[in-house]
Image (cartoon, rainbow, N blue to C red):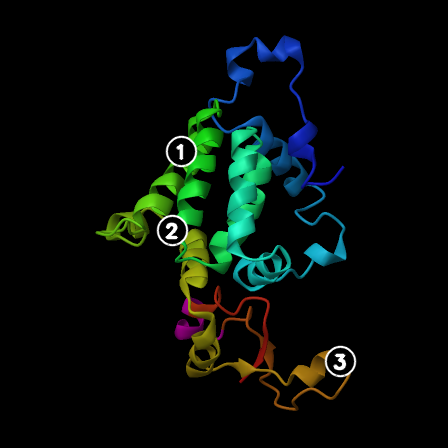
Amino acid sequence: MTINQKHNVCEVPESLQQQWSARSYDGSVEHNSRAVINRYPGYWDGNPTTLIPLSPEDSAPLYVEIMGGAAPIIAKGRALYGEAKYGHAQEILNKLVYAEPQNQEAKDLLADVFEQIGYQQEGPSVRNSFLAAVYELRNGIPTGATPKSSEPDMIRAMTTELWLDFFGVRRDSDKVDALCRRAGYGLRNPKARHGASAPSDSTSAACGVINSPSARLISASCRSTWCST
């Protein structure tokens, strides 16, 4: 039983179903059952195909081509919708929307499917995820001010460790190397990882070794990356 199957077969015992605290009002059985697997064995299902998968926008056009294009997919999607097989319908319509993001007919039909799935959810967080997608498929992504997680009050409330982690995940990975170099670090020759001789510079160190104030600020960004000055 893998993380991509468990949520379809996991059932809460009938005795627990009668307890308010065990209902799906905060989270859901489907989500939480997968979260337990993710926490312990991990998110990978053991199938090499899913180890380094294509991005959806790269794989979707292939599926659409194999299925004969948009028209038969939409026809089949409508048939599955009429049979209340919403999970099957979303599977093929999602491929089409990724392959043809401007196809409004496909987006509207997928929105109808999501709407029905959302209505069936007991948990508000799962229901709202589907219904928010319904709105975006029909009306586009809402515009306007977006929430910010880097306001002064938020930063002041962080511990030093949390702030360094926050700083690290906010960095542009394409610019981290240049940032490391400005702080006195450069990426060690990758060949050194495979048995070749490492740089002879006696100051070679890992990014985790902090030797300057500026380096402290970027330690979270290049943490675990071998560097040399």
**In terms of sequence position, does the residue under pointer 2 or pointer 1 come before the other?**
2
User: Position of 217 compared to 199: left or right?
Assistant: left
To which quarter of the image does residue 29 belong? top right
The kind of residue on which mark 2 rests is: Gln
Above/below status of 216 relative to 69: below
Per the image, the residue denoted by label 2 is 104
Q: Which residue is mark 1?
A: 128
* Label 3, label 2: how far apart the Cα atoms are: 51 Å
Residue 38 against residue 164 in the figure, above or below: above
Q: Hey, what amino acid is under mark 3?
A: His
Q: Which residue is mark 3?
A: 194
Q: Which residues are magenta?
A: 211-217
- Residue 212 showing in the rendered view: no
In the rendered image, residue 126, in percent from the top left (x then y), is placed at: 47, 32
- Residue 128 placement (x, y as % from top left): 40, 33
Q: Is residue 198 left or right of residue 24?
A: right
Q: What is the three-letter code of the residue carrying label 1?
A: Asn
In the image, which is nearer the foreground, mark 1 or mark 3?
1
Q: Front-most of 171 and 75?
A: 75
Disc 2 vs disc 1: which is toward the camera? 2
User: Picture coordinates of residue 168 (x, y %)?
Assistant: 45, 62
- Disc 2 on helix, strand or loop? helix
- The percent coordinates of residue 75 (x first, y second) are 53, 44
Q: Can residue 91 be seen in the rendering of this structure?
A: yes
